[in-house]
Every structure is written in structure tokens, then in C-alpha cells.
Image (cartoon, rainbow, N blue to C red):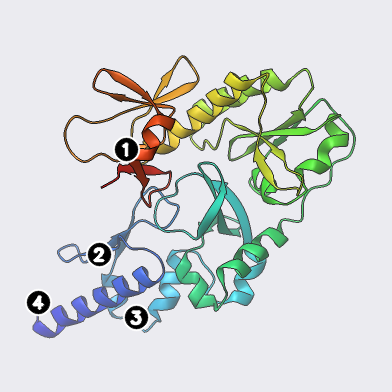
Amino acid sequence: MGLLRRIARVRLAGRMLRRLRRAGVPDARYLSRPFEVRFTAPGDTEPTILPLAPFLARQRSLDDLIAELLRVPVSWREAAPMLRPVLRGAAPGAPLSRPALPFLSEFVVVDQPDTMTYVTPAQSATWHSSKDRIFATARANLTGAVLHGSATTVRFVDDGNAYWTSHLLLPGWLGRLSEQVGGVPVAFAPERGTLLVTADDGPHLVALFAEAELLFARSPHRLSPMAYVSDENGCTIPYRSEKLYRTVRRAESLLAIHEYAAQGVTLTLVDGWRTRAVWPKDGPVLLPEADEVLIGDEVVPWADLLPRLTRTDHEPPRWAPRE
């Protein structure tokens, strides 16, 4: 291979890596021998392998190529009508997000007929649109379904276009279902495509906790086994109940265990509803939030241990000893 060709290959790869990283793909890397770039797009779990040889002779904007690979429109005018909000736990890569509910965040996706692509902070700069504008536009595109008739339990099963679980992000939407379910609406979003709603004093609430847990455990796209209601401002918040305290706490604990596992952190379930972490004997301490912590042979309640800890910048929260 001639020197000029080697230089051209390295330059092309370098430009590709820089543009991918500016587009919010920090793990992009160049492999010289196969002459390819590998990266994982935000929100994807499988890597993309991009052979570079076909592009050496092409006269084409790399920015257009990156936009095509990530399936994201280049202009705000084109992208805005396609934006939708979604609720998710931990997402691979570096998508644009903001906290929404315990262990869940709000993301924005570009919804196209055959794919759904997470928006990254880099797209905010490309579109010359602020983060707030992107989130507001995505929510505005989800107009909110209007239901007619009534039932003790309402089941929404997504066909890929309805974004039912995303409706929990719309202020006031859940509360408006009170007439349909005959009481204060309580919602479950056990997986991305399923939303269950019943009344807080209805006969099916306990059964829906069990159903939501089963769906959550079995789904490859699990979301949350927890229950949710609207507060006085119409915002969705976790459901609370003294009567069903242990049932509610079990659902919260199962979600915590799942989301911490994405960080490689182990929590165990105690008595079916409490979480327990273990203070490691060796190495640095970076604890997940739990109901109690096992330190040697002693079990210490979290509230007693908290004054000795300081929160780090991890999500879900992780805690380190105060210095």
C-alpha cells in the first residue's frame, strides 16, 4: 500500500471518529487492519461496524453520512415533527435525558417509520435548539389520547406508534382517566409497550401489582413494576399507600435492583420487600442506596449509615465514605 493511500485512510478514519464523537458517540474507535470504525449508537445495545473502504472514493459529506448512520435528521425543521418523549431506565451511550421518576429518566427519540433513534446532546448543537426546546417539542408532539367509555381497568398495549407509557410524562393526562376507571387513577408501566390503569380503591389494584411484576420480570424491554399517580399539579409521581406499604416497597426494590444491576452493582431482596447492600471488605466503597447495609456480620440501617456517606455523580445514586 502506497504512502499517500495510507495517509488518506488515516485521515478519513480520523474525520469519521471526530464527527461521530461530536454526534454523541464517545466509544467510536478505528481498526486499521480491517479498515473500519466500530461504535454503539446512543440507546443501542449492539455495535455498528462501518467499513471505510467504500468511502475513500466517494465525494460525500461525512456529516450527512453520520446523520444517515444514526438515523437522525440534519435540520431542526425536519427533525422537530418526528420527536417523541420516552421513559427509560439506564440507556447505553450518551442520549439527551433528564430525571423524570425514581430510577427513570425522560429521553427524546426521533420516531421514523422503521426505526427509533435517541437524540444526543450533540444534536442540540447541530439543530441550534436548546435542551428545553427539544423536550418541549417532543411532548407537544404527543398530544395525549382521549378515552371514551369506562372500565375498572384500562389496558394500553402499544403497536409501536402510540407511545402509551410516554403519556405519563404529560402533565394532567393520568388524572383525566378518573372517569374511565371510577376513581383516582393508578398506573403501571411494566414494559415499554404496556400501560395498565385502575382506581386506587378498586378491586384490581393488588392484582395489577402482581401482573406488573410478572410482566416486568419477563419482558426484554422492562420499564418499572412500580405504581404511579398524579400529584396536585398533574405531575406523575410514585404511588404511596400505608395499607399496601410492603407491596409498594417491593415494587420499588425490584426496580432498584434492576437499575443498579446495569451498573454492575448487586442489591439483594430481604423479606421480599427490603433491599440490602454489602460493604466490601477490600477495595473502595461505592455503595448503592439501600434499606440496609451488611458490614461484616452487622446489619446497619441506611438512615444510621447516611451521615457517614457522601453522594457521587452516579445515576442511580451511589455513595462513598466521607473523608
Write down the residue under mark 1: 264
Q: In the figure, is residue 63 to the left or right of 282?
A: right
Q: Quadrant of residue 113?
A: bottom right
Residue 44 location (% of width, % of height): 42, 51
Q: Earlier in the sequence, mark 3 or mark 4?
A: 4
What amino acid type should be assigned to the residue bearing mark 1?
Gly
What amino acid type should be assigned to the residue bearing mark 3?
Arg
Q: In the figure, is residue 179 to the left or right of 190?
A: right
> Nearer the observer, disc 2 or disc 3?
2
* Mark 3 residue element: loop
What amino acid type should be assigned to the residue bearing mark 4?
Met
Question: Which residue is found at the position 73% from the left and 43% from the top?
Answer: 231
Question: Which residue is found at the position 61% from the left and 21% from the top?
Answer: 245
Residue 290 location (% of width, % of height): 42, 31
Residue 219 location (% of width, % of height): 52, 31
Q: Is residue 178 above or below residue 96?
A: above
Question: Which residue is found at the position 88% from the left and 35% from the top?
Answer: 179
Instruction: Using the image, tell me which numbered label, if any, was put on residue 36.
Output: 2
> Nearer the observer, disc 4 or disc 1?
1
Write down the residue under mark 4: 1
Q: In the figure, is residue 30 to the left or right of 165?
A: left
Write down the residue under mark 3: 58
Q: Earlier in the sequence, mark 3 or mark 1?
A: 3
Residue 164 shows up from this direction: no
Instruction: Using the image, tell me which numbered label, if any, was put on residue 230.
Output: none
What amino acid type should be assigned to the residue bearing mark 2?
Glu
> Label 4 to label 1, Cα distance in Å?
44 Å
Q: Is residue 184 above or below residue 43?
A: above
Q: Earlier in the sequence, mark 4 or mark 2?
A: 4
Residue 237 shows up from this direction: yes
